[in-house]
Image (cartoon, grey):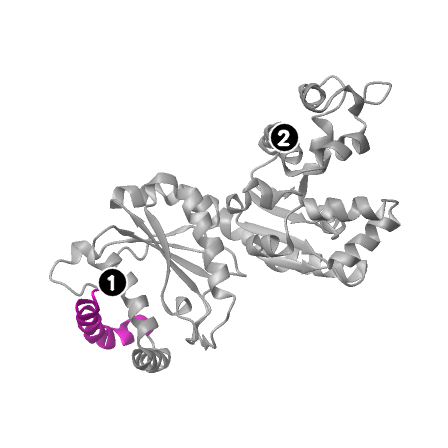
Amino acid sequence: MLRIGLTGGIGAGKSTVSAVFSECGGVIVDGDVIAREVVEPGTEGLKQLVEAFGEDILLPHGALNRPALAAKAFRDDKSRALLNEIVHPLVGKRREEIIAAVSEDTVVVEDIPLLVETGMAPLFPLVVVVTAPVETRVARLIKRGMDEADARARIAAQATEEQRRAIADVLLDNSGSQGELVEKARDLWYNRVLPLAHNIRTRTCAKLARELTPYRPTWPEDAARIIKRVEMAGGAKVLRVDHIGSTAVVGMDAKDVIDVQATVASLEDADALAEPLAGVGFPRRDDITADVAHTDDPRVWRKRLHCAADPGRPANIHIRVDGWPNQQFALLFTDWLRANPGVREEYLKAKRHALSTVDYVQAKEPWFLDAYRRAWEWASTTGWRA
């Protein structure tokens, strides 16, 4: 089963994207719908709201008066937090009940308005954020009959666009027409969502880039999202996660593949991460179990390697043991490149040569043998520490 997260600010157009995904075959778990369900008359949710905000949030026949609740719940941060403390756990429980009832080959789209606020984004292999300019959103809400002041208050009470962008694997811009958004959503479904679902189901790696590309400012942001997923999936077994390699060096050309290193206490802990990481889109590769050894004891160069199932964001997750030479060298090498422009040029030259050969990894090894020695000399001279 593939579970993807869908979010966007009020008036951004999230409902349109949700409808498209449903038409394409996705099972929609709508947070707004569930939020209404858990506070219907007779529910524990409604009882808790009345206890927290008063009897005057009810209509004469006993149902929730939503405008009356909004007037109280959105007046300050404390009141809004109280509302969330009551509703979020109930919504989460009901969401899991719905998901448990669908088949394993389903693509579940979890429509969660407050995905940023709940901190749930790293649980999903893919997060789609629908965005639009604030003034456009205000105009849409007014057209629906909402008071302008209320519309702006609702927008201000939610996460900022910057916060949503930080969790977005895909950003769907809805500043144009509804038809344009529909086409973007369909293209996303067939060219990224379905391939991702297939790769997760079959434990298949997304195709890796072969050519070098100029540095992309989005690489650190992509790495940050991957790191959060690895941290959440790994829990206490993951001691630290670092963005490593060429994409971690600002200004350096690289293959468009994000490399991160997860540090663990033992290879047994690394093996225990196989299923949790596969669940968030990083299946394990069993064909690579060690780095090339630069010491006489190849045992301490062993590792576990996971790849990304997402065709839109190729990545490698290297799991190495804390303090082993390969774990230390991955951190050292990245810092060495950052600090030495001349070394970066040397490495780029070595990579360009390797790309012209049959075996890219093997062709780089002569340069790396010398680089290993030189990097540790630099570490000794500068007092570098991991």
Question: Is residue 87 found inside the magenta-colored segment of the image?
Answer: no
Q: Secondary structure at mark 2?
A: helix
Q: Quadrant of the N terminus?
A: top right
Vertical comparison of 217 with 159: above or below: below
Vertical comparison of 200 with 103: above or below: below
Q: Amino acid at mark 2?
A: Leu
Type of secondary structure dominating the magenta stretch: helix
- Which of these two is toward me, 315 or 358? 315
Residue at point 87%, 47% (across, down): 144
Q: Quadrant of the C terminus?
A: bottom left
Q: Is residue 260 left or right of residue 157?
A: left
Please give the label number shown on residue 176: none
Percent x, y for residue 85? Answer: 60, 30
Asked if residue 47 can be seen in this view, the reply is yes
Q: Is residue 265 left or right of residue 252?
A: left
Percent x, y for residue 118? Answer: 57, 40
Asked if residue 206 can be seen in this view, the reply is no
Q: Which residues are magenta?
A: 359-384
Please give the label number shown on residue 82: 2
- Give residue 236's quadrant in the image: top left
The crowding category of the residue bearing disc 2, from other C-alpha atoms within 10 Å (few below 14, some 14 to 19, many at least 20), is: some
Q: Which residue is mark 1?
A: 329
Count the marks.
2
Report the residue that reaches farthest toward the left. 296
